Image (spheres, rainbow, N blue to C red):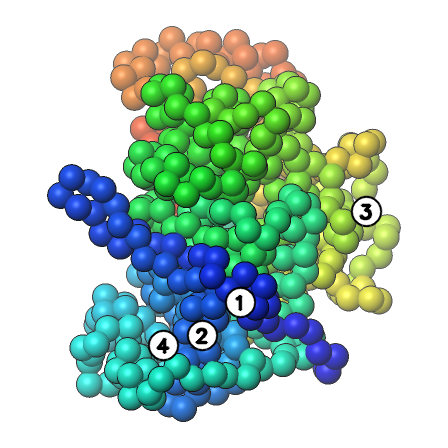
Amino acid sequence: MDNKSTPNIASYLSQRAKQIPYSAAVVYPDHRSKAGQVSYIHYTYAQLDQESDHLAATLHKNGVECGQRTVVMVKPGLDFFAITFALFKLGAIPVLIDPGMGIKNIKRCLEQAKPQVFIGISKAQLARKLLSWGKGSLQKIFTTASVCFPDCQSLPKLKQQSGSKLSFTTHQPSNDEIAAILFTSGSTGTPKGAIYTHANFNAQINALQRLYNIQVGEIDLCTFPLFALFAPALGMTAIIPDMDATKPAQVNPQRIFEAIENFGVTNMFGSPALLRRVANFGTTQQLKLPTLKRVISAGAPVPAAVLEQFSSMLNDKTPIYTPYGATEALPVCSIDSNTILNHTRYLTDSGQGICVGCPVDGADVRIISIDDNAIDIWDDNLCVDNGIIGEICVKGEQVTRGYFDLDAATELAKIPCFDGFYHRMGDLGYCDNDGKIWFCGRKTQRVQTTQETMFTIPCEAVFNTHPKVYRTALVGIGKPGNQQPILCVELLNKQDLKNSATIAKELRIIQEKYPHTKSIVEILFHPSFPVDIRHNAKIFREKLAVWAGKKLS
């Protein structure tokens, strides 16, 4: 056990409360007038710090202890920020699960996390009761509503009973103490709870600040709740837009422009699907976003066409950054839109993969031979030469050490070494001679025929250049080693499906130009690809493979 202490992630909030007490920390859209005008509620830094102190003291007084795993099922508003920072201060462990990942997955996550405490809105409490969430492990249950079930307590009432605002001494964690459990989206399998330490969070905050030169006092548009928690730590005002965070691809783009214009937003984080929707609307309406200093997009590769379209609304020197990473490790690499649009997009279009940039400072990135089995110990001989596609691995302070109560999954994902471990990203790619990393798809989604191994991104990218294609997905039917490679195609305009035979012929012409796509057997048109719930951008190729198999049988 490492007993060395590290700053509690919540200490950043207290620091900001002293530094900029009257600056807004979180701003939330409360309601709209009949005319459609939005009204906001907010916490200043001082208020958020006081409120999270008061909540930490109240929860502690009512039996919540340091180290207790606490599920937080609260909408991304003022309560979400106050409760999460209160738990950090208390030393309790927030367990954060995407509400949109589906009932079955949420139940699985809760069974895995075995939470002792549950804090949720009324809707979450009803689901907990009906679906027996946390049965057998929950000891304390709190609701954010004034009225509650007999088995839970009302946080607003408990706070009221505890009197005036209470101060609280923030827990001082050790370096390897669990700070939070954040569940992966489950886009390529069952969601897993990544164990975050306070040291992991600190490393991420420092990396993001250095990488993007984020300044105290900036205004951040938070379209993804987990990323929003970094805003107060970085000294930014977090603006929560009027949107359903679980459906970024269906966002009302006017609401995004509204929030940016109302507050002069300088920093924006959004999934590729959200950027596409906002860019389509903005360019059609000839709108501009002059206040933005930077845009950050992650969760899946951002198509060059989306970068180009969104960039047209920005000032000439405003970059769009696309950091590469995962729930278990972020950031790992980063690249900007200028580099992509002026150079790497052309290599991507010819099937050379997607460039995700150079490793960030402090990230030791290696490419190892593809292996589906656990690897007992790190050896430099595992590494492949530049230009050879293998599995991307990373070591660094921002890399989480394992999955909660999933030893087999942790063993598969981590390679111990003399000074720590490497995390296997589950992604395939290669390193070029300039040190840049190129992403070539998920390891589990590679297609293994009798003749060759085919990688999703290099194959799909050449077909994505067709003007009527929205996106494609390479899938394999059959057992690995004897798979049939099939290309699934989603068109930009569903009306073009009536011309699918002609489009298929045009795609066959593209196919013949490239050696790595020649063995694709069939081209199938799908009306709308299944995608992940978190970013609405990662394609569920496993589901498409099942669909293609049925279609061809």
Report crowding for label 2: few under 14, some 14 to 19, many 20 or more residues within 10 A (C-alpha).
Answer: many
Labels 4, 2: front one: 2
Labels 1, 4: front one: 1
What's the amino acid at mark 3? Cys
Rounded to the nearest angstrom, the CA distance separating label 4 from label 3 is 44 Å
Residue depicted at 19% across the width and 40% down the height? 36
- Secondary structure state at the residue bearing disc 2: helix
Q: Is residue 8 left or right of residue 149?
A: right
Residue depicted at 81% across the width and 47% down the height? 383
The label on residue 383 is: 3
Rounded to the nearest angstrom, the CA distance separating label 1 from label 3 is 47 Å
Name the one closer to the observer, 372 or 309.
309
Labels 4, 3: front one: 4
Q: Are marks 2 and 1 in contact (CB under 8 Å)?
A: yes
Residue hosting label 4? 118
Looking at the image, tell me whether mark 2 or mark 3 is earlier in sequence order: 2
Rounded to the nearest angstrom, the CA distance separating label 2 from label 3 is 50 Å
Q: Is residue 507 above or below residue 47?
A: above
Residue hosting label 2? 50
- Secondary structure state at the residue bearing disc 3: loop
Rounded to the nearest angstrom, the CA distance separating label 1 from label 4 is 28 Å
Q: Is residue 112 left or right of residue 325?
A: left
Q: Give the image location of residue 369, x and y in percent.
A: 75, 45
